[in-house]
Each structure stands twice: as structure tokens, then as C-alpha cells.
Image (cartoon, rainbow, N blue to C red):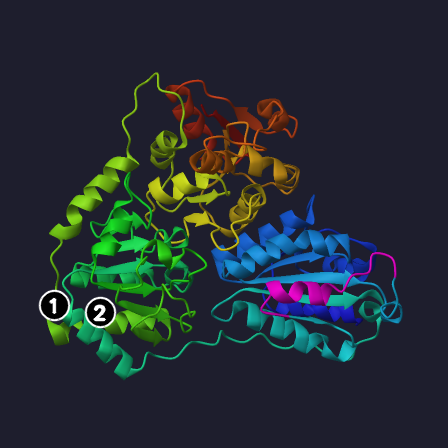
Amino acid sequence: MNTAEVLVAGLEREGVEYVFGLPGEENEATMFALRDSDITFVPVRHEQGAAFMADVYGRLTGDAGVCLSTLGPGATNLLTGVADANLDKAPLVAITGQGGLESLHVESHQKLDVVDMFAPVTKWNAQISDPGIVHESVRKAFKTAQHEKPGATHLELPEDVAYDDCDVRPMESRGRVRRPEPDVPSLDRVRDLLAAADRPIVIAGNGAVRTDASEELRSFAETYDLPVAATYMGKGAVSDDDDHSLLTLDSGEHEEASDAIESADLAITVGYDIAEHDPADWNPDADTTIVHVDSEPAEVYEHYNPDVEVVADIAAAVRKLDACCDEIDATFETDWYDDLREHILADVTPDRESGDPFTVRKVLPVLREEMADDDVLLSDVGSHKMAIAQNYPTYEPNTCIISNGLASMGISVPGGLAADLAVDSNVVAATGDGGFMMNAAEIETATRIGCGYTILLFCDDEYGLITEEQVEHRGEHFGTELANPDFQTFAESFGIEAYRPDDWRELHDALETAIPSDEMSLVEVSLE
């Protein structure tokens, strides 16, 4: 075999089902190796779309999503989605082509130092400069990408090395490396803090969902009657139907969830990364007693300086903390947060008259009614993301996907394709008109490969979130207005169903028809 064929055989050993990408001259050997493999190659319309697909696929499955591009502009286009996966802790392996080794010491056509460029946005990346290292490089890329905390890795394969004869064979994939059990002294300190607390609260982060610690966290909250506020990426770790849930950190018309954290005397964070949500928002005076439960030590930050850190397998740590109840015989009063939860739930279901104009907040209850508990809502980035994070009740982990690490616009349409491939449930990709137009071409990719999901498009003819912030800061806005095509005609040009409801009854009917369908569809909601 040649090096490219060994690389692809290594992908097969790692269980890769899909590679999302664009072909180029320099990755020709890899392309034909993929053709002869059991892997499905998905040609996309833009490399950023490929990276977002790999990003969302990795986040939903826990297995590294794979994206591929050629050198130069192909690699630079890939970069944003790779960075998004890395900050969102989604396992991803990026593969890029490169010119031959003999030309890399001089300036040459489309030549960039791609390995150096990817270094800041990956956990590890390398050039396969010799056929003899391809098997180790592939294994390391997947092991590193999938090891907790997961993230992005990158391999560059020069075109001459790709064609070289290769006498190594792919390495066997192995089971994931597990984090150790929590240490007893740390658990003892947490037990003492719990025993002394009057109003403890749990903050559920991305890691609680990512590491399948939801069952343990739900039991922990039930055992102690603890309120739980999630980050945007921790939604669903505890069901919002549970009386202990305060939805997300910003939920409530007057941010009642944040009020609960500020009035708590102990905050136990579970799988929380400060990249998800700035602790200064809920610990402004840096005086909250904090327990950090995560697979890695906490970042050093003035507003997040934990009193105790339990660094271990997250599910195991929460399970051990749950067992501490037998030793301290403690449950806590709930009346201090019961009213806050009532206010939050009231905000989630705003009053609506039949003649009211569409707003994102008022559309969300209609959407929630039409989606099953295990259906997946994927949010793009913009003002609608904030409403979804704060007001969309989520009942199961990994059913409301929000990027809040890099928080890049344009993820929703390609991400919906990946979600449709990754799960058996219905998928809705919610987006604003700004984010939609960034990667709308991937509708063609989705229809070509037979995907079926619903795009819920909120249209306000501007970059709405930036408008809101500018108006709040300066009383006016600039540079945020947009001119859009006729979205219904645009969608229909791809051969998909498109709906433009004018009232609440039509919106309900459109979602009721579109969401359970196995076909691609777009529902445009015009906002006032």
C-alpha cells in the first residue's frame, strides 16, 4: 500500500464512517483511497461546512468527526470549524494535503505553514513527513482528540509522501483512557462543605453532558434537593421538567438563575469550563465558595478560584458525592429557590395572543410542543441563540446543541446535516438570516446525500444581536442591516419544501408537518 492507503485503513480501524471535505490536487491519493474503503466521503460546498459537520458529529457521538481539505485556502477555510470543535471540547480530526516535501523549503504556489497555523486551535497536530510514521500518527490523532477533555487534532500529508510505498500497517484502536476515581481527601472536604452549607447549588457544564454523567448528576440533585443551573452547553444534564432545574445561568426575565447562584453559599460546578460562561457573571465579587468537579484542574482565574477541586472521572466523582449523604444525613430546604423556578418557567411560556407578531421567545414554546424529548435542536449563533439557551426547556442530554466556546456563526445548516447522520431522532437546525447565509450552500450537500432535517430560519434582516448590543451601549446601531433573498424561493430552488407562516396557526401547522418528515424543509419566521 501507499501512505495514503495506510492512512485511510487507519481511519477504518478507528471506526470512521464519514469524512466530510473537499477534494484537491494535493489530496488525490487520499481521495482514491477513500473511494476504495468502507468510509463514506461527503463532498461539501465549503471547507468550513466540512469542519462544522465533523465538529457536531463528534459532539453528538463522542467519536472524532473527520474533515478533509487540500492545502492553502482549503486549510484556511477549515480553520474556523476546527477551532470551534477545540473550544467546545468536541473530538475532531482534520486532514489536509500539502505540496511535495521538495518544494516546502521555498515559497511556492498556495504554500502556507499549515501545521504552524493549526497549532493554536488543536490539542496536537503534525506533518506525516515519512511513510513510516503514518500508523502512529493516525492512532495518536484519534487518541488525543477523544481523550478527555476532547478536542481537535490535525494531520498534514504531503502529496509525494502520500504516494510513497509504505510497509507499516495501521495500529489497532484501543479503548478510551479513563480518568481515575476521585481521591478520598478531596471528597472528605466536599462532604464537610456540604454539611456546613445552607443553600448549595450545582452548576452543570458541558462536561456533565460530554462524559455521560447525567444520570449521576440527576441522582445527586434528587438526594440533596439541590437546585441545578446549567451552562448553555450543559442543557439537558438535568431535565428541565425536574423541580430542581433552574434551566440555564441566565434564565428568567430578571436572570433569576443568576440570582440563585449569588444567594447560594456553596456552588458545586460539574464539568464546567470557564470558556462556556464567564464566572464573573455569577461570582462578580469572587467570594463564592466553589467546588470544582471535572476531569482536569480549574483554570486560574480571579472569579473562579475553587476551594476544593475533585479531579477525576466526572460521573464517578458525582456518584461518590451522592454517597456522602449517608455520612452527613443532609438534605436542604427548597423554598429559597422554588419561587425563582416558578418565575423562570413563567418566562419560558410567555403570554401570546393570536394577533401577536412572531418573536423567538414566543416561537420556542410552539417548537418545543412539536419536538419529542429526544429530538435534537441545533442552534446557530445570534440573538436567537440567547433565547434558545435561556428559554428552550431541554429534557435529555445532547438534545440542544449550542456552540458557546468559540460560538461561531454559520454552524447550524452544516451541523444539522451531521446531526441527521449521527442520531435517529428528528433534527431542527435553528438559525438567523445572518448565520444561515454563511453556509446555506450546504443545503445542496444535505439533499444530495439524502438527509432530512428542518431548518428553522428567524429573519430580521440584520445582525440582530449586534444591533441589540449597540443600541444598549450607544442608543443607535451601525453596520448591522442586511438585504436578503426570497428565502422561500431560495429553499425551493434546492428542491426542498419551504414554509412562510403568517400567523401562529400556520406556524404550528408548518412545524407539525416539517419536523417529523424524512425530507429536508425550511420554515421561515419573519421577526418584527
Using the rendered image of the protein, determine whether residue 90 is visible from the camera's viewpoint: no
Q: Is mark 2 on a helix, strand or loop?
A: helix
Residue placed furthest toward the front: 474
At horizontal 26% and vertical 55% (from top left) the residue drawn is 228
Dividing the image into 4 quarters, which one contains the C terminus?
top left
Q: Give the range drawn in magenta.
A: 108-124
Is residue 286 rendered to the left or right of residue 481? left
In reply to whether residue 460 is colored magenta, the answer given is: no
Measured from the top left, where is residue 329 in percent x and y? 10, 71
Q: Return the residue nearer the eye: 48 or 14.
A: 48
Q: What residue type is labelled 1?
A: Ala
Q: Mark 1 points at which residue?
A: 330
Classify mark 1: residues with Cα within 10 Å, few (<14), some (14-19) or many (20+).
some
Using the rendered image of the protein, determine whether residue 147 is visible from the camera's viewpoint: yes
Q: In which quarter of the image is residue 212?
A: bottom left
Classify mark 2: residues with Cα within 10 Å, few (<14), some (14-19) or many (20+).
many
Pointer 2 or 1: first along the chain? 2
Q: Name the residue under label 2.
A: 322
